[in-house]
Amino acid sequence: MMRRQREVEAADTGIDRSADPTAALLSSLCRHLSDRPDQQKVLGQFGYYLGRWIYLMDAADDLEKDLKSGSYNAFRAYQRETPEETKRYCNDVLNMTVSQLLLAYDLLELTAYQEVLDNILYHGLSWQQKYHLFAHEKHKKCKIKDRDDYPYLAHGDKR
């Protein structure tokens, strides 16, 4: 998968293909967390979108640095007129990914750690997005989540 990741990035194929090797790797790993075929399929989808989110969150966080250095970044070709608009675009792509992740998560039959996982998935991912895309450069604290920026919270918010 690491070789495939390098090949995809060298070909500069865009967001979806760039995220696929990391997503496929995590999908494969997560499938092995259950012996039940129905749960393996769901775990595979869960792992895929978690891997995609991790890869794309890293790319979004590194975009400014990568643009300056000339390093590869999946979001490079998707820049908007302003850096703020580009960050909003990255946030939208990440939100779509999390929404797919949560659809799979809601199908899992958890036997332990559900409260911890709920907190990570419904709150932690949005906090990380907000912090890395909008707040860290301004040294703001991210305590309040803006539901307009994170539409998946409205559906599954466990607060």
Image (tube, helix red, strand yellow):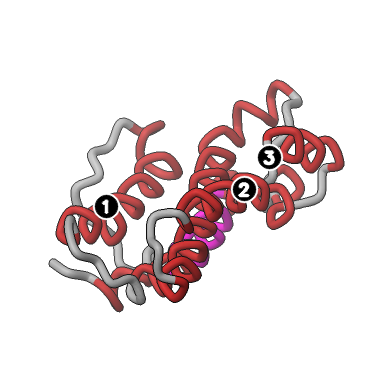
Q: Main secondary structure of the magenta part?
A: helix
Q: Which residue is mark 1?
A: 120
Neighbourhood count class around disc 3 (C-alpha, 10 Å): few under 14, some 14–19, many 20 upward: few
Q: Locate residue 58, reporting x and y percent.
A: 53, 38
Task: State which quadrant residue 39 falls in.
Answer: bottom left
Q: Which residue is mark 2?
A: 82
CB-based contact (under 8 Å), mark 2 and mark 3: no
SS under mark 2 = loop
Marked residue nearer the N-terminal end (2 or 3): 3
| Vertical arrangement, residue 129 with respect to residue 132, above or below | below
SS under mark 1 = helix
User: Which amino acid type is shown beneath numbered disc 2?
Assistant: Thr
Q: Look at the image and give the residue range highlighted in magenta.
A: 87-99
Q: Which residue is mark 3?
A: 1
Q: Locate residue 16, reporting x and y percent.
A: 69, 57
Q: Which quadrant is the N terminus positioned in?
A: top right
Q: Locate residue 63, reporting x and y percent.
A: 61, 36
CB-based contact (under 8 Å), mark 3 and mark 1: no
The foreground one among 41 and 114 is 41
**32 sits to left or right of 106:** right
SS under mark 3 = loop
Tell me, for residue 26, which label it has, or none. Answer: none
Residue at left offset 30%, top offset 78%: 155
User: Which amino acid type is shown beneath numbered disc 3?
Assistant: Met
Neighbourhood count class around disc 1 (C-alpha, 10 Å): few under 14, some 14–19, many 20 upward: few
